[in-house]
Image (tube, rainbow, N blue to C red):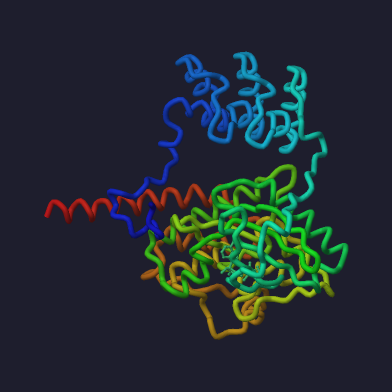
Amino acid sequence: MESSSRHQLPPSKQKMPSQRNEWEGPYRLLFCSSKGDKAGVMQQLMEGVDTNLADYDKRTALHLASCEGCTEIVVLLLEKGADVNFMDRWGRTPLSDARSFGHVDICKILVAHGGIDPMGIESQAPCCEIDSTEVDMNEATLIGEGAYGEIYLVKWRGTEVAAKTIRSSIASNKTVRDNFLKELALWQKLRHPNIVQFLGVLKHADRLIFLTEYLRNGSLYDILRKRGRLDPLTAVAYALDIARGMNYLHQHKPHAIIHRDLTPRNVLQNEAGRLKVTDFGLSKITQGRDVGYKMTGGTGSYRYMAPEVYRRESYGKKVDVFSFALIVHEMFQGGPSNRGEEPEKLADKRAYEDSRPHLPSIVYPEPIKKLLQDCWHKNPDRRPTFEEIILHLETMEGNLQQRTMGTYCRCVVL
Ligand SMILES: Nc1ncnc2c1ncn2[C@@H]1O[C@H](COP(=O)(O)OP(=O)(O)OP(=O)(O)O)[C@@H](O)[C@H]1O
């Protein structure tokens, strides 16, 4: 079993950050296909790797190239005999993926090769429904309370899962309820190691309840409250987890998914120490008045709110980058800055006085300092994308690991 916090492993046992190991051997074909690396794909095929090699989710190189919009690779794989209608674990063909991600040219190529899409063009699968008899809410343990309702730990088909109840002031409004279900249907389609997995909606008479995977270690908010300041290597590893989950949401096709309420409470940790983002998209449903939305008190969203949101200007994906910076700042500091200050006042000062948290050099290594300053820049266009943030963090993680290894080796030699 893995340790509950990655930073506690001795350097010799730590997994290196790069994903290379996972992509060595024949799986390199999948990696190269997803990256549009034509030379890499050709080399793998020349080495005799099966064109229809699939990963554990039965995703082939053609699925990945179709998702990522790598037209040349799609053509090459088809020429080399890839099965155009290979179905993955969810019954999706490469054409289903190309359609979902809006790659029109690839769709045409796949159709010309006999590709079909069992999901249907406009497939907006309804939210997966779970019979309420499968979950005994009387045996539920309360684990938290949020803006929308309570969270319970329940057992579903022998597995511990989280049941999120939506208070009736929200769920009884038909439009809001329908929008909620639409957002959940979108969430149900998402699959990423750094996104909390949605499981389904519980058919229930008086309340709207949905199930997600249960993350035993609770929220980043709980972790920081218990542990205080994180060491730089852990903080960077955690930041990478969040950035990868967020990048997946921002690169969602045909429309980016903006979280709008990225806070340490909406980042959860599983027992392997991996952080996952939750509750994206839901905040926009309750933004209208009269639906019972309330900010969750002193730790509420104002604290992480981008200036343009506070000023009620139009905003885009970069609002999440701003919130991300404040979360990373807290990881190095062990909690929020200006704890005593009213979150709304704080947001006001950030929006109108350009106020930002302090970055003392003794706590914040120079590259982190620079990254945070960029991420909470007042001009959203000057903030980096999550893709760029990931690259910076990976470099920092590599450097920190090398430094830790160096210290560790010296200790052994001495
Ligand atoms: N899937 C889960 N697994 C384990 N604990 C969870 C899960 N979801 C939520 N929790 C716990 O319940 C708390 C409340 O969660 P919830 O998402 O409802 O509210 P919030 O994030 O505090 O506020 P908001 O509703 O505004 O997002 C979390 O902080 C976390 O400790």
212 or 224, which is in the foreground? 212
Q: Quick check: 20 left or right of 219?
A: left
131 or 183, which is in the foreground? 131
**Residue at 82% across, 72% down:** 291
Percent from the top left, x then y, of residue 260?
68, 62
Q: Quadrant of residue 123?
A: top right
Percent from the top left, x then y, of residue 43?
48, 18
- In the rendered view, tell whether residue 154 sits above or below residue 360: above
136 or 195, which is in the foreground? 136
- In the rendered view, tell whether residue 260 sits above or below residue 347: above
Quarter of image, ligand 1: bottom right
Percent from the top left, x then y, of residue 98?
71, 32
Q: Quadrant of residue 87?
A: top right
Percent from the top left, x then y, of residue 357?
52, 73
Query: Which residue is most to the left?
Result: 414
**Residue at 46% across, 58% down:** 271
- In the rendered view, tell whether residue 299 sits above or below residue 207: below
In the picture, the quarter occupied by the C terminus is bottom left
Count of marks overlaid on the render: 0
Query: Which residue is most to the right?
Result: 174
**Residue at 56% across, 62% down:** 267
**Residue at 80% across, 34% down:** 120
Q: Quick check: 284 left or right of 194?
A: right
Q: Quick check: 337 left or right of 322?
A: left
